[in-house]
Amino acid sequence: GESVGLHLPTLSVQEGDNSIINCAYSNSASDYFIWYKQESGKGPQFIIDIRSNMDKRQGQRVTVLLNKTVKHLSLQIAATQPGDSAVYFCADHPRTLTFGKGTMLLVSP
Amino acid sequence: DAMVIQNPRYQVTQFGKPVTLSCSQTLNHNVMYWYQQKSSQAPKLLFHYYDKDFNNEADTPDNFQSRRPNTSFCFLDIRSPGLGDAAMYLCATSRGGGGPNFGPGTRLTVT
């Protein structure tokens, strides 16, 4: 069936490093993708989104890249901070939002 | 601030005792969603309302029902909670096909 998944369950980085979280999707009809950050005990928080007519979108310290050819997207976080520690989900939105499994980002000082 | 509000934040119910979780929004969004999230898992969509139209996911158990009396409020009813229904329940809203905004969630414990 259709799925949205992430390659790595946990990513550990040092404060100040750049982080890259990857995500694969399988639904060719997906035309809208969102990255969420979820801290323990809280609801998912919108980080950045991208539509399928774009390859790249930048926000504050975050960049999302979309490669439709291989059905892959990534979230890049520049100068990672301890406050960035959380689980990151990618989600696709062809009709309703479907979440991938999540990657836990651990940032050590 | 415009937001999605969920009450209560923590709910304890007994096995088989009906329970209702509440969600309200001040965003005036026309779409409201209910997700179930179990420990260390991604949120799973249970159902959503597009305006007044109810859309149930195919694998959502009949034990879960929802009501949306008006634009601002949406309720999740669990008719006979089982131990496997213990989870975080997340309400979210969106305007049309935009990215959903999530509430803080209600953590349900079933004893």
Image: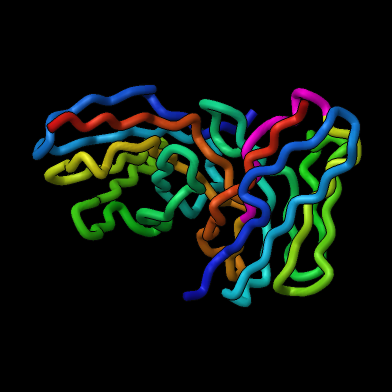
Q: How is the image coloured?
A: rainbow
Q: Position of residue A37 (x, y in %)?
A: 39, 45
Give A99 or A85, whichever is nearer the viewer: A85
Quarter of the picture containing the C terminus of chain B is top right
Is B108 placed above or below A92 here?
above
Is B67 placed above or below A97 here?
below
x 58%, y 38%: residue: B43
State left or right for residue A50 relative to residue B57. Answer: left
State left or right for residue B104 relative to residue B55. Answer: left
Is any part of residue B44 visible from this angle?
A: no
User: Magenta stretch containing residue B3, yes or no?
Assistant: no
x 47%, y 75%: residue: B1
x 42%, y 47%: residue: A36
Q: Position of residue A26 (x, y in %)?
A: 52, 34
Q: Position of residue A17 (x, y in %)?
A: 11, 36
Is A51 placed above or below A107 here?
below
Looking at the image, how many numbered discs can be counted on the residues? 0
Q: Position of residue B57 (x, y in %)?
A: 77, 43
Give A12 or B24, whichever is nearer the viewer: B24
Dividing the picture into quadrants, the one containing residue B81 is top right
| Magenta segment | B82-91
Dividing the picture into quadrants, the one containing residue A72 is top left
Dividing the picture into quadrants, the one containing residue B64 is top right
Is any part of residue A20 visible from this angle?
A: yes
x 30%, y 52%: residue: A55
